[in-house]
Image (cartoon, rainbow, N blue to C red):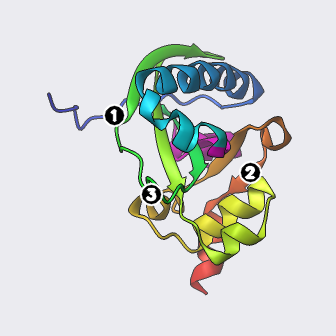
Amino acid sequence: MQRSAAKNYIHRSVGRPELEALVNLAGLEEINFFKRNPHLIDLYRNRRIAVALCQGAALQYLGIGYGVNDFDVHFFYRQNLNKPRLCRTVKHLRANGGAFEGVSVDFIRTVVPNSQQAQESTEVTDLLRAALRNPQTNNLKHLSRKAVVGLLPEAVFGVVIWEPRFAEQNRK
């Protein structure tokens, strides 16, 4: 079944209530992900760097978006060389997120490759910015074109990890 090309954007701001709702949903999804994929528990459960709101809804949070079609929530993990890639399967659900009722939420896993920059820092924002500044995967390239706003860990809640101006600065 193919998704419809027409998108219905909700023109409403994204703020703290939406981020808090996404944190709760992400916590449940991470538990369920490893229940669905017990073979990945030893490989990835303790390698999570962060969970973040990405793409269009993250732009909306910054006040520079064009509305919300869905919430794209990415789980970023440090790469495990015993299984360097995770399946690109997206987990879709409909949920209430703050002022958004019955909105589509997509959960995506993103592996941050082991690179020199990523190994030198333990700071979440530094790790993700390094990965987005020099994206080594198609997924990271795609994410680097829009925005990334932290959800978890608590230290990055609401922090703008990446925004379009960072990408523009890298092209100069």
Amino acid, disc 3: Pro
Q: Residues within 10 Å of mark 3 (few under 14, many from 20)?
A: few
Depth check: give the residue in front, 146 or 67: 146
| Circle 2: element type | strand
The residue located at (70%, 68%) in the rendering is: 119
| Circle 3: element type | loop
Quadrant showing the C terminus: bottom right
The span from disc 1 to disc 2 (Cα, nearest Å) is: 25 Å
Residue 80's place in the image compared with 102, above or below, is: below
| Circle 1: element type | loop
Depth check: give the residue in front, 97 or 37: 37
Q: Position of residue 132 (x, y in %)?
A: 59, 65
Amino acid, disc 2: Val
Q: Position of residue 56 (x, y in %)?
A: 52, 44
Q: Position of residue 92 (x, y in %)?
A: 39, 25
Please tell me the numbered disc located at residue 52. none
Q: Quick one: label 1 or label 3, which is nearer the N terminus?
A: 1
Magenta span includes 112: no
Quadrant showing the N terminus: top left
Q: Quick one: label 1 or label 2, which is nearer the N terminus?
A: 1
Please tell me the numbered disc located at residue 160. 2
Q: Which residue is mark 3?
A: 84
Magenta span: 47-69
Foreground disc of the pair 1, 3: 3
Q: Quick one: label 2 or label 3, which is nearer the N terminus?
A: 3
Residue 63 in view in this figure: no
Q: Which residue is mark 1?
A: 7
Badge count: 3
Residues at badges 1 and 3 in contact (C-beta under 8 Å)?
no
The residue located at (52%, 69%) in the rendering is: 135
Amino acid, disc 1: Lys
Residues at badges 1 and 2 in contact (C-beta under 8 Å)?
no
